Amino acid sequence: MMKKIHFFCLMAFVLLFFSCKSLGDVVAQGIDEESALEINKITTLFSEYSDTQSKKIINEIIDLNNSLRKKAKNNRIFEAKVLGIDGEVAYYSNNVLLVDRIIKKIEQLNEREEWFYYLSALQSNDVIKKITILNDGILKATHNSRLKLYLADLYYTTAKYKDSIIIYDKLLADGIILPKLSLIKRDISFYLSTTEGLKNQSTAAILFHNEIDANNFITMVRNETKFFNNFTSSALTMDIVLNELHKLGYIYTANSITVTKKYISFLFNRIFNKQSITNEKSEFVGKSSIDDVTTESIFYKPILFTVEWDIIELEDGKKFMPDKTVSAFDCFKIIKNAEEKYSMFDN
């Protein structure tokens, strides 16, 4: 009699197990290798989008995710990831309500899904809350590399440079390929953590640009030095500031052009020497001591000055490359270098 009862219980358990599986109750079910690679490609594309803001990349993500959607049926883990991708696309389309709905659906499917925490942090307007959500997700999510990267970027934005470096370096040590912007932020964080940092935190939003225009360049000088104390009023638009600086001979054009090395030299020669050289002929004659700048150029004197004072270094010790554009971060280092040299300059 007991054997029959045991056999009946065993058969009931087997039937229950397979009926649950047939209903799609497969939280533990994995994702096939091909689909996993497609998901990894999508996360890489999201990183590229953050660098470029290209609509073409978003369209490619949507197409890839639509093909994944067909394979995700009856797989709660897979469905949660597809929804997460939908949610991030919706976020970049500023569809706040849709993102909120997607977050709730992901939580119902798989509360350990990384996108659940990632989207929740994106939706929050409170930096402290964002950090709390991300730290919670790093502990609970099955995968957490994007959460860590987001947290490192947040630490950069909030001037917690040493904390951001720790996370960036740990991700690199784990073999994670960081987006270009994050690599730049890592280098900036390292530099700022070894110096006095920023005097005005709004400068942080400028520093990771590959090129810099005159507006942002002068903004950095105003934010981070005392060179332009006469132009610190927030009521002054940058157009007015550029025009005034041009009239006083600090810059050779009032337009917000892309900043080159000769532009920077022109500015700092004026700041240090208190004299305009606009339309002046150079008093220098003979062979130039700089290979790619002639003594006849109106830029020769300011370039020579910034080189002699080690404000800007020559390329390979010979060429200045006056028309070379400069990244915002390199501009910042030149500005801080000039500030240090100015304290030793006899005015």
Image (cartoon, rainbow, N blue to C red):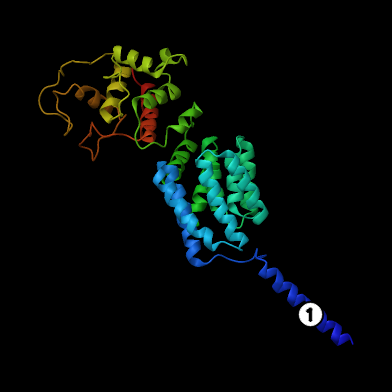
Seen at 19% across and 21% down, the residue is 298
Give the image location of residue 61, x and y in percent. 45, 51
Is 98 situated left or right of 212 in this image?
Answer: right
Pointer 1: residues within 10 angstroms few (<14), some, or many (20+)?
few
Tell me where residue 54 sits by quadrant: top left
- Badge 1 marks a residue whose secondary structure is helix
Q: Decide: is 80 above or below 126.
A: below
Which residue is tagged 1?
10
Left or right: where 101 falls relative to 3: left
Q: Is residue 301 visible?
A: yes
- How far from the left and from the top, in percent, is residue 320? 23, 33
Confirm whether residue 347 shows in the render. Answer: no
Residue name at image x 28 percent, y 30 percent: 260
Check the picture and name the quadrant holding the C terminus: top left
Above or below residue 240? Residue 168 is below
Q: Is residue 346 left or right of residue 200?
A: left
Q: In this rendered view, identify the residue nearer to me: 282 or 71.
A: 71
On the rendered structure, is 117 left or right of 56?
right
The percent coordinates of residue 154 (x first, y second) are: 54, 40
